[in-house]
Amino acid sequence: MRQTPRAARHHAGFSMVEMLIGLMIGMIAVIVMMQVFSVSEGYKRTTTGGDDAQNNGAIALYALQRDLRQSGLGVSAIQVIGCDVTLRAGVTLSAMSPVTINHASIPAADAGDTLLVVYGNAPGSNEGESVQAKPSLASYTIAAAASSASSPGAFAVGDRVIGQFQPRPTPCNLSMEPVTAVAGTTVSVAVGVANTGGILYNLGQTPKVLVYAVRRGNLTVCDYTANDCSVAGSVANSAIWVPIASNIVSLRAQYGRDTAAPMKATVDTYDQTAPATACDWARVLAVRFVLVARSSELDKTTVTNAAPTWGGAASQPIDLSGVANWQRFRYKTFQTVVPLRNMAWQGAQTGC
């Protein structure tokens, strides 16, 4: 039986024109969805990138503030500050001070400055203990109160101490040594120094000599008591320069100094002038620093037109030219001033 024209049309399907129209509508829908997804992804990258920079910067800021607040504990007295100190055989830290910006022995950071921070963890006084006698080269007899375990000036086996001549020698070359025995008022050390009197400074069981620097896009720290942080060939070794916060692209710092004559124990100016004498070091009462954190994601276009700034009234731009495609990242700056309380407690030094 022959099929009628009406039945033939019923089974013919879509025409070419109808298929093309449907395909075009589908493509338009896909394009719209992709545009919505692209905008949404852009907002997500902006939000998460800002969050990453915020979190990384906060972690780095906390680590630096924590150590800077403790800097100088046990080693801030004018008799010892600025001396060259042998930390262990073959490793000497020149011009030891609570905080040093861009110490001469430290390889330059990838971006910005380096910060060297020194402090002890003993319960005693920053002024040290007066040495009453020297029974032998490697022993010191100190004030009776220092022999008591409950005394703020207590010494214990394993403490790291620095013996200092009186008056301060020139040049001032000292050594950090372990306490080997404590018997009454006599403190014995490994080697000792040949003098008849002076001061014995106690830095406790685990003194810290830490160097902070930006390396390989991270804020890193090197422990000078365990490694020689002055070796340029070790800067890429993450076991020596340990990353503590990622995506930190710059660290800048300045000394807060008392420039009055005589000293008045308050900060007058901030700069990077390197102290040259013990009195110069005693005038450093605070550190102002800034950390620059960036987003982890590279944007498709320029999102940062001008470099971030830092400082006081006269803001200074932070050079980020060493960062590839730096304008396609987002940045957050974290700036603060940390008083060096162990320096401030020394007060104005007579003669400075």
Image (spheres, rainbow, N blue to C red):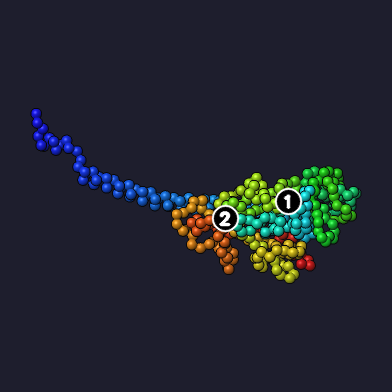
Asked if residue 341 shows in the view, the reply is no
Residue 254 found in image quarter: bottom right
Q: Percent from the top left, x then y, of residue 190?
A: 83, 46
Asked if residue 252 shows in the view, the reply is yes
User: Can you say which quadrant of the picture contains the C terminus?
Assistant: bottom right
Residue 65 found in image quarter: bottom right
Residue 181's disc is none
Residue 72 found in image quarter: bottom right
Within-10-Å neighbours for mark 2: few <14, some 14–19, many 20+? many
Disc 2 residue type?
Answer: Val
Horizontal arrangement in the rendering, residue 341 relative to residue 14 (left or right): right
**Image point (80%, 52%), residue name:** 175
- Relative to 318, residue 160 above or below: above
Q: Percent from the top left, x then y, of residue 238?
A: 63, 46
Q: Percent from the top left, x then y, of residue 233?
A: 67, 50
**Image point (70%, 66%), residue name:** 258
Question: In this view of the protein, which residue sits in the foreground, 52 or 179?
Answer: 52
SS state under label 1: loop
In whole angstroms, how far apart are the C-alphas of marks 2 and 1?
A: 29 Å
Sooner in the amino-acid sequence: mark 2 or mark 1:
1
Q: Which residue is mark 1?
A: 120
Question: In this view of the protein, which residue sits in the foreground, 219 or 298?
Answer: 298
Disc 1 residue type?
Answer: Gly
- Frontmost of labels 2 and 1 is 2
SS state under label 2: strand
Q: Which residue is mark 2?
A: 249
